[in-house]
Amino acid sequence: MPVRVFVAGGTGWAGAALCKGIIAHEGMVLAGALSRTHAGKNLADILELDGGNYPVYADVEIAVAKTDFDVFVEYTKPDAARKNVLTALKNGRHVVIGTSGLTSQDFDEIHATALQHNCSVLAAGNFALTAVLLQKFAEMAARYITDFEIIDYAHESKVDAPSGTARELAHRLSNVQESRIHVSEKDLIGPKESRGARLKGVQVHSLRLPGYIISVESIFGMKDERLVIRHEAGASAEPYVKGALLAIEKAGTFNGLRRGLDSIIES
């Protein structure tokens, strides 16, 4: 039986590319999409696809009630993502999260809800292979170097800061060890915000400028030497599609929340 997939944010930049990838995948069926601005329409018309009927809904509760699907993919906005994910889980659907901006508290609630309803959730700040490798290499470096910080780059209109990619990286590095601070916040001279934010014990800086899509780098410093590990994304959503399809394939093979694409690649 093919996996039936519903995509929240199916008309967006990443969601639209994923929908096309699902339709082309022999083992998957696109069940529908969530989009407030295109509700009531056929996604095939919106994305200029050849044939097919893929209903678009405005509300997640209506979508769950009217659509039969196995996996809910979340690719909307941070202010809607939490409700969408929890609603899907409470209705027994597995979830893949690609949306940025969810907090540690959100993930704690999502994990508990997934366990309660015997569902799986895979949350990845970034589904691109190079981003996964950045995280792995940075974790290796953090075992040996105590001085490190993260710089997060994105386009000027991105509302969440840090990005999901940077949040995920900070979370993972903090599990290795917290970065060392040489001058405490109370001893700083000048605007304290200029030193960025302390996230999970790791210093993070977010830049929002035209010319960037998504980029993140982890910088490690030692006396007379420095290591920089950087991921850069281009304008195409293609790098994220393969990783998201893999996450969908793995849905239902575990219970609760897992973070990072490599958590299922290596399982």
Image (spheres, helix red, strand yellow):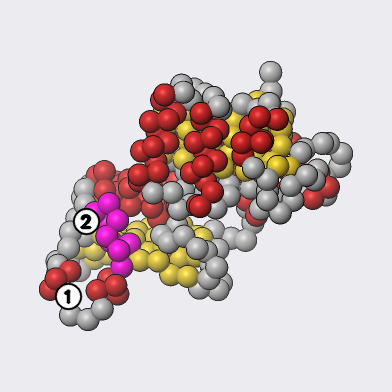
- Which quarter of the figure has residue 213? bottom right
Per the rendered image, the range of residues in magenta is 196-204
- Residue under pointer 2: 179
Residue 57 image-quadrant placement: top right
Residue 223 placed where, x, y %?
17, 66
The Cα atoms of the two marked residues, 1 and 2, are separated by 17 Å
Taking the image as shown, residue 43 lies to the left or right of residue 122, namely right
Q: Quadrant of the C terminus?
A: top left
Q: Position of residue 110 (x, y in %)?
A: 42, 36
Q: Is residue 19 above or below residue 232?
A: above
Is residue 42 or residue 240 the one in the foreground? 42
Give the side of residue 239 with respect to residue 27, left or right.
left
Q: Position of residue 172 (x, y in %)?
A: 32, 45
Question: Within 10 angstroms of label 1, few (less than 14), some, or many (20 or more) residues?
Answer: few
- Do tag 1 and tag 2 residues touch (Cβ < 8 Å)? no
Instruction: State the predominant SS element of the stretch in magenta.
Output: strand
Specify which label sits upstream in the sequence, 1 or 2.
2
Helix, strand or loop under label 2: loop
- Determine which residue is flagged by label 1: 188
Q: Examine the rendered structure and indicate whether residue 29 appears above or below residue 242.
A: above
Question: Where 88 falls versus 77 (above or below)?
Answer: above
Residue at the image position 48 percent from the left and 44 percent from the top: 82
Foreground tag (1 vs 2): 1
Q: Secondary structure at mark 1?
A: loop
